[in-house]
Amino acid sequence: MSLEQNIESQAQALHSHIFSQPQDQYTNKPWALVTAIDAFAFANKMMTYRDEKIQVSKQQLERMQTAPRTLLEFGTYVGSSAIAWGAILRDLHGETSRVYTFELSAVNAQIARDFVRLAGLQDIVHVVEGRVRSPCADVVFFDHWEKFYVPDLKIIEELGLLRKGGLAIADNTDMPGAPKYVEYVKGSARYQTEEIDIEELKPWPSIVMVSTVVSDE
């Protein structure tokens, strides 16, 4: 079984687990669903964006001078972080908020859509299967293949998709590591970068890297 097939197999197992439970505990309850996904993912060693990181990221979004309305996520997987982003943005900016999350796997994309509908966020969270064709955003989140973090960020820069004051949030910069991304954002005058280390997640990936756009150049 290839790595991609194994990832999809785990996602399908999660899907079966969630939909085998009484649905009223998750219907239109995004945080309950995110918690359930997180628990299954932790027990089965799935690489999702853990609740501790979500809470740290939520604090960063709440501190933004202008409340974020649009977020781009690169790497949907099962959609747990996209659901969390949708719930956070809805609290901050209402039903006009939008999350666009991009996933190459058709299997994972469909699973994520099912979870988004269950959470009642289908009007806010949009799962896009395939390559990126994105609108402008207040926040971008990188949680896909680390080797694409820098190329994708450069495309965002070239197209002017992330406004001044916006945030670029990246996961897994410590494990498995994204040294080129770390070097790029820390060495660029465009960003002010902070590494937030969540000790209780160790020895699993524990760092959330938050880069604020401070310059248009």
Image: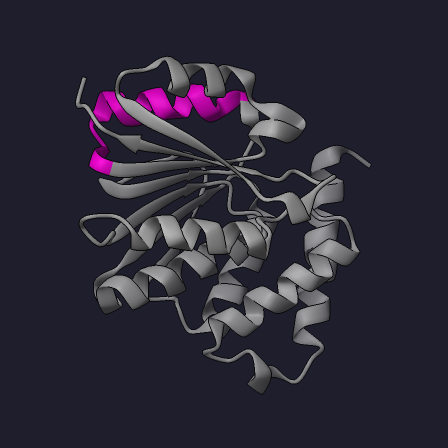
**Image quarter of residue 15:** bottom right
Q: In this figure, what is the number of numbered marks?
A: 0
Q: Quadrant of the N terminus?
A: top right
Q: Which residue is most to the front? A: 199
Could you tell me residue 147's position as x and y percent? Answer: 54, 21
| Residue stretch in magenta | 147-165
Question: x, y percentage for residue 138?
Answer: 25, 43
Q: What residue do we see at 22% from left, 25% from top?
A: 159
Instruction: Work out whether 103 lies above or below 175.
Output: below
Which quarter of the figure is the C terminus placed in? top left
Q: Report the side of 100 relative to 107 (left or right).
A: left
The image shows residue 78 at horizontal and vertical percentages of 58, 54
Residue at 23% across, 63% down = 93
Residue 154 colored in magenta in the image? yes
**Residue 124 falls in image quadrant:** bottom left
Q: Residue at x 24, y 20 (%)?
A: 158
Q: How is the image coloured?
A: one colour
Foreground: 104 or 65? 65
Say which of 214 and 79 sits in front: 214
